[in-house]
Image (tube, helix red, strand yellow):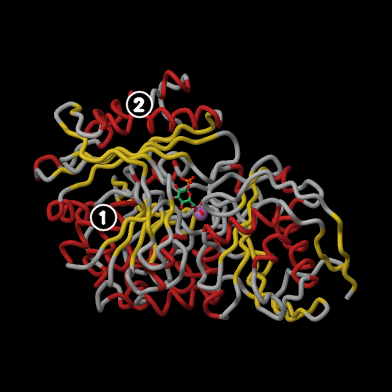
């Protein structure tokens, strides 16, 4: 194999964000851009020589070109073995699983997750380490440091590797295994869940729809629900992954998965509806005429974990990200197990999972998962919900009502202001930060601020701290108001405002969250001076 050392200038303009490096496709298409990042990343993996790496992506535009470049660079950098998904495809949870099962040194996932795809849209590169989870903050910092210093990168000279069929090939000394992207993941699901019980449910009168939004979960969902569990053909909607995700926004929420939401709120509603995102790690759960917030979903899964064989022995603990509602905490307390609050992003759950401190974890942004991998896992959550529905034979609405009657309801809503100028985003956070000392103790519409701070997290396993993880106002009645700037956007800044209020009165459990949360929403807009600073009268997305 012939290799080349290519001279290059470092020009990554910023550190990778919440989950990897996300940029417009045109940015990745600049000469040497992707190569610089990959070389900087390889330089951070100790003892790379001879090691195994997993490689694949969500199939979005530029996946195919990027994967060939990375294969050539992996060979030139001395990797021993590459496991690549057929046609370059892998979902994020499938990569996490393979890293663990095949004792790989890590995995590269080509995705910008829920961001739209296509020549004028987004691409991304995400690195997961040895435990199968997203790279730590320290790792990401070292990649960024390397990217500012490198002068050259290594790449093999070769024609494209055929990824259309399962095969064993090689490039120089590096062996390449092209595998079915679905098989190992589906087998893992079979080990965790009672597939006989689930197939009895799905082959009876129970009806579900899973919307893959033309992204990566299509082949996984079709294999699991229609083939293995015998659900009728047509259960999976938009199941063919497309390079531009059909022009849609593969973010499973009420705005971007509107056709599914409309179906679930119509007279023709099936019993159960679910959707996933671009790379397959998110999930949205719906019943007939009801949407389950992701925060509630985590709580319900935890409260009913006994319905799932793999968790029948009980949970060790539960973790949620800071902006996620406290619904899961209430369940943990009633189960007498520990609960943890981490910053946004799945990487923070990794240490807790590795140390055996938690079994379930989740985020308000449609992410739920367990210790079976080190990523959130969309189809896992859907199978977990199906297990509860199979076990209880209750409609989703009744499960939610019973849950709220027992634990109270944590009314919750997130308001996003997308694509505001980056400086405005900064100004809003500075405005809020400046007010923190005077906010403490203040009264607003009958409720008092108990804590006003900028969230700092100290990892209970390795003691590392992460600062500036979001401005939070905690009220004495348990309500919360949280502000953050997104770390996954690619243009300008996205301000996220999270609102939460607990309701115990059994007569007030079925109200419209936006009405219940109105006072908190108005307070948040006022404190952050959103209209004055952005000119926006309303958020772009409400979930
Ligand atoms: C968002 C979510 C966060 C999630 C992250 C990655 O980050 O809020 O909870 O972990 O996306 O999800 P941010 O910084 O934009 O708020 V995925 O499915 O895009 O990998
Ligand atoms: Co995702």
Q: Residue furthest right?
A: 2
* Figure quadrant of the N terminus: bottom right
Query: Badge 1 is on which residue?
Result: 396
Q: Is residue 486 above or below residue 281?
A: above
Asked if one can make out residue 535 in the rendered structure from this viewpoint, the answer is yes
Going 38% across and 27% down the picture, which residue do you hit? 528
In three-dimensional space, the C-alpha distance between marks 1 and 2, rounded to whole angstroms, equals 33 Å
Q: Are marks 1 and 2 in contact (CB under 8 Å)?
A: no
* Figure quadrant of the C terminus: top left
Label 1 beta carbon within 8 A of ligand 1: no
240 sits left or right of 344 in the view: right
Q: Where residue 429 sits: x, y (%)? A: 43, 33
Going 76% across and 75% down the picture, which residue do you hit? 78
513 or 492, which is in the foreground? 492
Q: Where residue 395 sits: x, y (%)? A: 24, 57
409 or 434, which is in the foreground? 434
């Amino acid at each position: 194999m012939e290799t080349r050392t290519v001279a290059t200038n470092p020009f990554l303009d910023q550190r990778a964000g919440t989950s990897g490096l996300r940029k417009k496709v045109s940015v990745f298409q600049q000469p040497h851009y992707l190569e610089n990042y990959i070389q900087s990343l390889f330089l951070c993996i100790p003892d790379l020589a001879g090691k195994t790496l997993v490689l694949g992506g969500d199939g979005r535009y530029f996946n195919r070109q990027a994967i060939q470049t990375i294969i050539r660079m992996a060979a030139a950098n001395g990797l021993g073995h590459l496991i690549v998904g057929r046609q370059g495809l892998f979902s994020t949870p499938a990569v996490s699983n393979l890293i663990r099962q095949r004792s790989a040194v890590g995995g590269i996932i080509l995705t910008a997750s829920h961001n739209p795809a296509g020549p004028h849209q987004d691409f991304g590169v995400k690195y997961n380490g040895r435990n199968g989870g997203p790279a730590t903050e320290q790792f990401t910092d070292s990649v960024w440091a390397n990217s500012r210093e490198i002068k050259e990168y290594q790449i093999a000279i070769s024609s494209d590797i055929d990824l259309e069929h399962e095969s064993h090939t090689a490039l120089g000394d590096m062996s390449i295994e092209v595998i079915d992207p679905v098989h190992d993941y589906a087998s893992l699901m079979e080990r965790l869940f009672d597939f006989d019980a689930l197939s009895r449910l799905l082959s009876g009168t129970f009806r579900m729809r899973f919307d893959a939004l033309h992204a990566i979960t299509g082949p996984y969902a079709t294999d699991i629900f229609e083939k293995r569990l015998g659900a009728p053909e047509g259960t999976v909607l938009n199941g063919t992954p497309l390079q531009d995700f059909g022009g849609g926004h593969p973010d499973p929420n009420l705005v971007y998965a509107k056709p599914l939401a409309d179906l679930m709120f119509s007279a023709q509603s099936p019993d159960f509806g679910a959707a996933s995102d671009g790379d397959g790690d998110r999930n949205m759960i719906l019943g007939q005429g009801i949407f389950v917030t992701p925060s509630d979903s985590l709580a319900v899964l935890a409260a009913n974990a006994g319905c799932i064989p793999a968790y029948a022995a009980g949970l060790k603990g539960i973790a949620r990200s800071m902006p996620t509602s406290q619904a899961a905490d209430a369940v943990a307390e009633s189960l007498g197990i520990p609960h943890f609050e981490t910053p946004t992003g799945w990487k923070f759950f990794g240490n807790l999972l590795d140390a055996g401190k938690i079994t379930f974890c989740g985020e308000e942004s449609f992410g739920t998962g367990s210790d079976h991998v080190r990523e959130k896992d969309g189809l896992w959550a859907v199978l977990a919900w199906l297990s509860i529905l199979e076990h209880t034979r209750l409609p989703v609405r009744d499960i939610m009502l019973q849950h709220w009657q027992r634990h109270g309801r944590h009314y919750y809503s997130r308001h996003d202001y997308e694509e505001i100028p980056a400086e405005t985003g900064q100004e809003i956070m500075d405005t809020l930060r400046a007010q923190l000392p005077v906010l403490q103790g203040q009264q607003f519409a009958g409720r008092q601020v108990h804590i006003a701070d900028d969230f700092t997290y100290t990892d209970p396993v390795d003691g590392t701290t992460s600062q500036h993880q979001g401005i939070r106002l905690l009220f004495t009645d348990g309500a919360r108001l949280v502000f953050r700037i997104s770390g996954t956007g690619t243009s300008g800044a996205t301000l996220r405002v999270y609102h939460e209020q607990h309701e115990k009165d059994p007569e007030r459990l079925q109200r419209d969250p936006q009405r219940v949360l109105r006072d908190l929403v108005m307070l948040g807009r006022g404190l952050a001076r959103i209209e004055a600073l952005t000119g926006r009268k309303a958020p772009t997305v409400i979930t």
